[in-house]
Image (cartoon, rainbow, N blue to C red):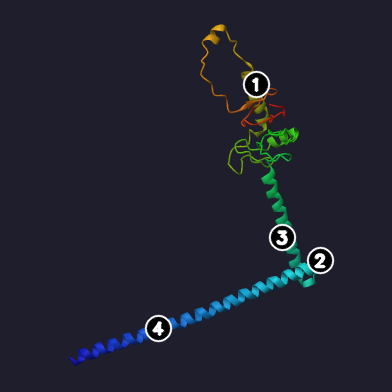
Amino acid sequence: MELIMSCFEKIGNTITNKSKELARKAKTVSETSSLNNIIRTEERKIDTHYKMMGKIYFEKFGNSPDEEFLSSVEAINMSMAKIEETKNEITKIKNRNCCPVCGAHFKIDAIFCSKCGTKVRDEQQDKNEQAYKCRNCGHMLESGALFCDICGAKAENNLNIENEDQSEKKQETAVISVQPVETDTDNENRNPDPVNLPEYKICPSCGAKSDDPEAKFCNECGSSI
């Protein structure tokens, strides 16, 4: 019986000692972690002041830096120029389909603004660009490209876009210009119910359709509609 009690006592002591050791280690980890956080905070402060010092030096002596800072100043100037160039590209993209006069948005293939009639694209330039434009997504392709790098469509037929578009416009104009001759019988049998008008306008000069029901000018020829 005494032997059994002695064994339980040893086990209890071992558990107690292990618990104390674990508690001591946990306390050590907690204390060191707190101290490490203080170190990291101070290091961030130092980095902030380093950057402030560097910015002040660049602003004061960037035009005539010491030789040891010359490479860093040149790298900063190159990055700033790249940022400015990229911002200008973003501005061009945002304003690419906006009329420079009235600010109205126009279709990517429009030649005239449908709101004020301002010419927004050079026709000859448009013809040249069409040869390198993906007919599937409209992305500009590099010269000699066989596939569009955006949608993957074949680029081999891009040179035929202009002729096909002109042919389609002629067909549309021909269809629109043919009007049936009404007879007295047709007038008598005409349905008195109101008919819904099409949600687009047709240019009387070139026959092009405008998807904007409020358009005042043709996107293709600039005529008043």
156 vs 201: above or below: below
Q: 13 or 144, which lies in front?
A: 13
| First reached walking from the N terminus: tag 2 or tag 3 | 2
Please state which amino acid type lies under the numbered disc 4: Ala
> What is the x, y in percent for residue 211?
61, 31
Q: CA distance from mark 3 to mark 4?
A: 53 Å
> What is the x, y in percent for residue 174?
64, 18
Q: CA distance from mark 4 to mark 2?
A: 60 Å
Task: Give the residue at mark 3.
Answer: 79
Label 3 Cα neighbours within 10 Å, binned few <14 / some 14-19 / many ≥20: few
In the structure shown, which secondary structural element does the residue marked by tag 2 occupy? loop
Residue beneath the point at 73% across and 63% down:
76
Residue 51 found in image quarter:
bottom right
Q: Which mark is residue 173?
A: 1
Q: Are marks 3 and 4 in contact (CB under 8 Å)?
A: no
Give the label, 3 or 4, closer to the camera. 4
Task: Give the residue at mark 2.
Answer: 63
Please state which amino acid type lies under the numbered disc 2: Asn
> What is the x, y in percent for residue 81?
74, 57
Q: CA distance from mark 2 to mark 3?
A: 16 Å
Q: Which mark is residue 23?
A: 4
Please state which amino acid type lies under the numbered disc 1: Thr
